[in-house]
Amino acid sequence: MIPAPKLDQIITRAQELEALLADPGALKGDEFVSLSKEYADLSPVAEKAQALKAMLRELDELKAMSEDRSADADMRELANDELYALKKRLPDLAHELQLLMLPKDAADERNAILEVRAGTGGEEAALFAADLFRMYQRYADLHGWRFEVLDVADSSVGGYKEAVAAISGKGVFARLKFESGVHRVQRVPETEAGGRIHTSAATVAVLPEAEEVDVDVDEKDLRIDVYRSSGAGGQHVNTTDSAVRITHLPTGIVVQCQDEKSQHKNRAKAMKILRARLYDAERERLDAERASSRKSQVGSGDRSERIRTYNFPQNRVTDHRVNLTLHKLEYVMTGEALDEVIDTLIATDQAERLAALEQQ
C-alpha cells in the first residue's frame, strides 16, 4: 500500500501546479509549457490518489461503525457488508495508482518507425517478412493509426527482403515497442513438394520516431548517393535517379529509400529513418548507463533475441518471453488477436517494474 504521506505529496503538488497555471503571466519563459506538461502528467495520478484517500477514510469509518457495540445490530451488519465490499475494491484501486506512478518511457507517446527484414531461410524468410509487415499494417488499421510505407526491397518471389514504414497515432510506440526481435516461422512453403515443414525467421525493429530537435544532424556528416530505383517491378522501378542512399559518416549508419518517384520525397523519408535510428542508438546508450542488475524480461529490445514463434501446422503463436501460447494464428496474422499478446507483454513489464520499485 502507498503510504499516506506520499498520497498527500502527490495531491499537494497537483494543487500547487493548478494555482501556478491559473496565473500564466507570472511565469517566465518556458515555465508555463514545462509546468503544463507536469500538471497534465500528474493530474490523473492526483485524482486516483484522492479517490484512494477517500476510500481509506470510508474504510476507517465503516470499521469503527462495525465495532461499535452501542450501535444497532442491523447497522453493524450493514457496515460489515460494506466493509467487506470495500476491502475487495481497495487492492485494485491501489494497483491502478501504482501503475500510474511508474516512471514513464518518454518515447511511449511517439510515433514509430517499423523495420522488418528477412533473416535465415532464403525466399521463405522473405515471404514471412512480407506477412509480418502486412500483419502490422492491418493492426495499425484496426487501431486507426496511419501506416506510411517508406521503403520496400522486394524478393524475386513476392516477399520482402526489407520493408520500412512510419506508423503514427496515439500511443503507437508504447504498444509496439516489445515487437523488436527475431520472429520465427514454422510452415510448409508453397514450393515444397514433399510437404516438409521449414523453419525461417525475420527480424523486426520498432524505433521511436525522432523530431528534428531530438537529433542534431550535421549535413557535413552525411554522404548522399542517388541512383536508379530497382525491384521486382511496378512502383519500385523508374528511369530517373530518384532513389536515395544516406550514409551517416560518424556512426556508419546507412539508410535508403526508393519507394517514391521523387528524389526529394525519398530523401525526406530516408532522413526520417536516419533520425529514428540515431535517436534509438542514443536511447540505448542512456539505458545502458542507467541499467541496474535487473534485466527486464520483455523490455530488453535485443533484436538478436528470438521472441516469438508462428507455427502454421499447429495454428499456434508462442511468445517465449512470457510463455504465452495462442491457438489462433490466423487472427494474429490479421492483427485481430495481436492485442492479446501485446497486452500480456505490457502487463508483465509493469509487474516487473512494480516489483523492482518495491525492492528499492
Image (cartoon, helix red, strand yellow):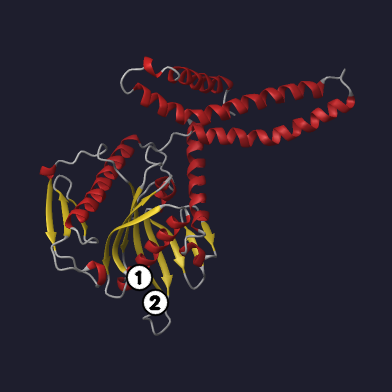
Q: In the rendered structure, are the residues bearing label 2 and label 1 in contact, judged by CB atoms less than 8 Å apart?
A: yes
Read off the residue under disc 1: 127
Q: Which residue is mark 2?
A: 189
Q: For label 2, count other residues whose C-alpha is less than 10 Å away and answer few (under 14), some (14-19) or many (20+).
A: some
Query: Residue drawn 81% across and 22% down?
Result: 67
Query: Residue 261 in the image: x percent, y percent?
Result: 21, 62
The earlier-in-sequence mark between 2 and 1 is: 1
Residue 255 visible to an observer of this rendering? no
Camera sees residue 246: yes
Q: Residues under labels 2 and 1: Cα distance?
A: 9 Å
- Where residue 238 appears, x then y in whole percent? 18, 68
Which residue shows up at 27% across the image and 44% down it?
281
Secondary element under disc 2, as helix, strand or loop, is loop
Amino acid type at circle 2 is Pro
| Residue 221, percent from left and from top | 12, 44
Q: Residue lying at the far top in this picture: please name it.
A: 26
Left or right, residue 327 beside residue 148: right
Compared with 65, 277 (above or below) is: below
Q: Does 299 sit above or below residue 34?
A: below
The reply, left or right, for residue 99 in relation to residue 290 is: right
* Residue 170: x %, y % from top left: 43, 45
Closest to the observer, 348 or 245: 245
Q: Quadrant of residue 20?
A: top left
* Corner quadrant of residue 136: bottom left
Note whether 290 is above or below 257 in the view shown: above
Please report the residue visible at 48 percent of the width from the left and 33 percent of the height from the top.
357
Q: Is residue 102 left or right of residue 70?
A: left
Extreme-bottom residue of the structure: 193
- Amino acid found under the numbered disc labelled 1: Leu
Instruction: Find numbered disc 1 in the image and state the secondary structure of the residue it sits on.
Output: helix
Q: Residue at x 71, y 24 (%)?
A: 58
